[in-house]
Amino acid sequence: AAPSSIHAFEDGHALAASLAVRIAEDLRAAIEARGEASIAVSGGSTPKRLFERLSHETLDWSRVTVTLVDERWVPDTDERSNARMVEALLLRHNAADAEFVPLYVEAATPEAGIGEVRARVAAMRLPLDVVVLGMGPDGHTASFFPGGDRLAEALDIANTAQVVPMRAPGAGEPRITFTLPVLLQARSLYLHIEGPDKRVVLEQAEQAGSPLPIASVLRRAQHLEIYWCP
Ligand SMILES: O=C(O)[C@H](O)[C@@H](O)[C@H](O)[C@H](O)COP(=O)(O)O
């Protein structure tokens, strides 16, 4: 795969401003080409400033479908919910018109809810136009956690399942996540990471044969744009 390109910024504000403009361009181009656009965003703390910036971008958000790269198996009334953060920070201002496809459904476990989630995702038009990944200090991305019970399945490039449940020591609550093949098919693929520690983890993952889950993305992505700031 082509080496990924890294864009370094002085701080999180400059990064969020630049990435929001870039993503908005991708979404406008998709609407121009296909009449609609789709984006999957990550959770965690890093994307907050990006969401605030993106929510102010002017484009026809009524033609945009927003979903999540992965989700913690909690309802959006729970503060751990990625849907809750997206609803609070991204789906407002201009972006309030976008359609949101959450990955959580009313079921006790992701294993019990997977059928309904797969039906919901199957109704989306794939491939996704934009995917924004994050990365944890352990080298996880999406819910591809080291030691995850279905990690091999999620990273299997031949897997036809679009989403899988995931339980992992470092994940806290059970998760649901898009699989690697779906994420790699995105027309635009970004990795948004901040801080010197994550830069070190990235360099470790770039080493040949690295077992870190993010390394699977670095090794297989055709076009990955990495956005980083200290
Ligand atoms: O649900 C999640 O937690 C994410 O989708 C996950 O993959 C996230 O990107 C990393 O955990 C980084 O999280 P931070 O931005 O908080 O470091």
Image: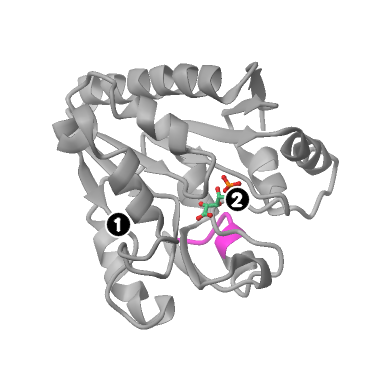
82 falls in the magenta region: no
Residue under the image location 42 percent in, 79 percent down: 111
143 or 229: which is nearer to us? 229
Determine if the C-beta at disc 2 is less than 8 A from ligand 1. yes
Quarter of the image with the N terminus in it:
top right
Instruction: Indicate the quadrant where residue 167 lies.
Output: bottom right
Q: Secondary structure at mark 2?
A: loop
Three-letter residue code for mark 1: Pro
Q: Is residue 156 magenta?
A: yes
- Whether residue 161 is visible, yes or no, is no
The residue beneath circle 2 is 141
Determine the secondary structure under disc 1. Answer: loop
Residue 62 as seen in the image, left or right of residue 117: left
Task: Name the residue rendered at 45%, 18% in the picture.
Answer: 17
The vertical placement of 72 against 178, above or below, is below
Read off the residue under disc 1.
Answer: 102
User: Predominant secondary structure in magenta?
Assistant: loop
User: Compared with residue 8, is residue 100 higher up or lower down, i.e. above or below?
Assistant: below
219 relative to 109, above or below: above
Image coords of residue 123 (percent x, y): 22, 55
State which region is magenta.
Answer: 154-160
The amino acid type found where label 2 is placed reads Thr
CA distance separating discs 1 and 2: 18 Å
User: How many numbered discs, if any?
Assistant: 2
Q: Residues within 10 Å of mark 2 (few under 14, many from 20)?
A: many
> Is ligand 1 closer than 8 angstroms to the Cβ of mark 1?
no
Residue 104 sits above or below residue 21 on the image = below
Classify mark 1: residues with Cα within 10 Å, few (<14), some (14-19) or many (20+).
Answer: many
